[in-house]
Image (tube, rainbow, N blue to C red):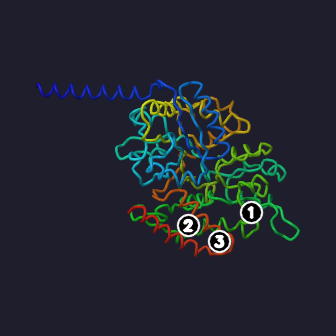
């Protein structure tokens, strides 16, 4: 009996110590501290974080957020090496798929159970974004606050649609997209394309290719995670790629239209396959433009169940493991504030005119808040609500260990572009993707 009581006392003592540590870790810092934050350098996002940092500092005067914009490619390549070299910032922005295949418990400061238990966090945040952020110990090591929702649909110029007599809300199929694209395309006297009806430039096209294969029921044929094998040599992959190539063959899309961050705002295309994030990105830099968004039609028919997000990466805040003392308290306080009061956090981009950002939220509180006042929402908050409500249930992620930056940006889209430009046949592209991605996948699991 004495041993049982002693054991019970030890358990109670350890529990109290754990609770005390958790409470101590998220109190206000006792002295003024500065937290350096690396954040992806895109104008809408930087404005959003700047405004939120100012609001956060007004609530917590002992904390200063030093926002450091970093270009996407540089952020991707420096994040993990900087942690190894102990030169990383205090708050780190990255994407959940950047850490796939790594034990995040060795990289970042844990958010659970310090701020919340895992179960408490799952009651506040949709669970899917947490899958790459959970360490070998079962705790969560990053807060996935948002997704730009690549390839969830099309951004479009409202004035061009109005001039062509096209109602974006009536586009319910890929046949509708083809008809709209034809009407929106303008030609030069020599027959070359002056304005593409639709643009497929950039990486979202590669995301959509995977989604369209999966919507045909070929997810298991496309990728076998147990064998770490990719197979694009299937009819469903060919059909999806032929659908994209139709727009090139029928001179509705000019594959030489260039970077969509330039071509789309300059109206070299009437609509662009993208994510809702592009609405804020364009209107922040070009406030004179009026940009809309409509969701991806199912493929191949309107009756097909919508499945998107085969590769859907989540913008995530991580905290450096090296945070200590008051800086650790401040870092945890920053994350906890966003989780506890996400409405303030998201109202900044939705309600700014033009919007700083539009996309999918991971916060159940925000969805509930938007639903409760849906009739009062502006267009951009409605887009975010729609993309979240339709998009999250339709997510069909692939269990690949290759990051989005490599899989989509460096491999699949450049190969699609080779076909668009007539340098490769579709069969050659599909064969290459099957062999090369299998090699990368098997290297990643070794």
Quadrant location of the C terminus in the rendered image = bottom left
Along the line of sight, which residue is nearer the eye, 336 or 200? 336
The numbered mark at residue 111 is: none
Badge nearest the viewer, 1 or 3: 1
Along the line of sight, which residue is nearer the eye, 407 or 44? 44
Residue under label 1: 257
Residue under label 3: 419
Along the line of sight, which residue is nearer the eye, 12 or 168? 12
Locate residue 180 relative to residue 36 in the image: left or right. Answer: right
Which label's residue is closer to the chain start, 1 or 3? 1
Considering the numbered disc 1 on the image, is that residue within a helix, a strand or a loop?
loop
Please say if the residues under marks 2 and 1 sit with CB atoms less than 8 Å apart.
no
The numbered mark at residue 236 is: 2
Distance (Cα) linking label 1 and label 3: 15 Å
Task: Please identify the quarter of the rendering in which residue 283 is found.
Answer: top right
Along the line of sight, which residue is nearer the eye, 414 or 419? 414
Local packing at callout 3 (Cα closer than 10 Å; few below 14, some 14-19, many 20+) is many
**What residue sits 45% from the left and 25% below the top?**
27
Which label's residue is closer to the chain start, 3 or 2? 2
């Amino acid at each position: 009996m004495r041993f049982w009581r002693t054991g019970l006392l030890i358990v109670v003592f350890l529990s109290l110590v754990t609770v005390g540590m958790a409470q101590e870790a998220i109190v206000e810092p006792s002295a003024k501290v500065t937290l350096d934050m690396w954040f992806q350098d895109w104008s809408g996002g930087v404005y959003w974080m700047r405004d939120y940092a100012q609001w956060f500092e007004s609530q917590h005067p002992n904390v200063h957020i030093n926002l450091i914009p970093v270009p996407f490619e540089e952020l991707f390549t420096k994040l993990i090496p900087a942690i190894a070299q102990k030169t990383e910032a205090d708050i780190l922005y990255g994407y959940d798929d950047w850490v796939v295949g790594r034990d995040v418990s060795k990289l970042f400061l844990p958010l659970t159970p310090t701020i919340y238990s895992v179960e408490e966090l799952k009651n506040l945040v949709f669970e899917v974004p947490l899958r790459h952020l959970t360490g070998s110990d079962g705790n969560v090591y990053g807060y996935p606050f948002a997704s730009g929702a690549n390839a969830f649909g099309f951004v479009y110029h409202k004035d061009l649609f109005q001039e062509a007599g096209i109602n974006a809300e009536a586009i319910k199929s890929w046949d509708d997209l083809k008809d709209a694209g034809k009407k929106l395309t303008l030609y030069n006297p020599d027959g070359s394309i002056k304005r593409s009806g639709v643009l497929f430039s950039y990486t979202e096209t590669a995301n959509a290719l995977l989604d369209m294969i999966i919507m045909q029921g070929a997810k298991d044929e496309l990728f076998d995670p147990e064998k770490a094998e990719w197979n694009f040599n299937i009819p469903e992959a060919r059909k999806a790629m032929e659908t994209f190539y139709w727009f090139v063959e029928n001179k509705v899309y000019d594959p030489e239209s260039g970077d969509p961050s330039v071509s789309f705002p300059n109206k070299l295309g009437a609509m662009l396959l993208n994510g809702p994030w592009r609405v804020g990105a364009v209107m922040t830099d070009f406030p004179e433009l009026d940009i809309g968004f409509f969701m991806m039609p199912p493929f191949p028919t309107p009756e097909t169940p919508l499945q998107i997000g085969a590769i859907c990466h989540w913008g995530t805040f991580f905290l450096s493991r090296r945070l200590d003392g008051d800086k650790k308290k401040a870092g945890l306080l920053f994350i906890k504030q966003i989780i506890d009061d996400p409405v303030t956090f998201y109202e900044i981009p939705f309600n700014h005119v033009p919007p700083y950002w539009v996309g999918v939220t991971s916060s159940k509180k925000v969805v509930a808040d938007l639903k409760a006042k849906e009739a009062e929402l502006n267009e951009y908050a409605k887009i975010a609500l729609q993309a979240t409500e339709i998009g999250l249930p339709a997510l069909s992620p692939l269990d690949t260990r290759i990051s989005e930056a490599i899989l989509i940006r460096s491999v699949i889209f450049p190969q699609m572009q080779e076909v668009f430009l007539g340098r490769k046949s579709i069969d050659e592209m599909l064969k290459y993707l099957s062999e090369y991605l299998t090699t990368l996948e098997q290297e990643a699991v070794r």
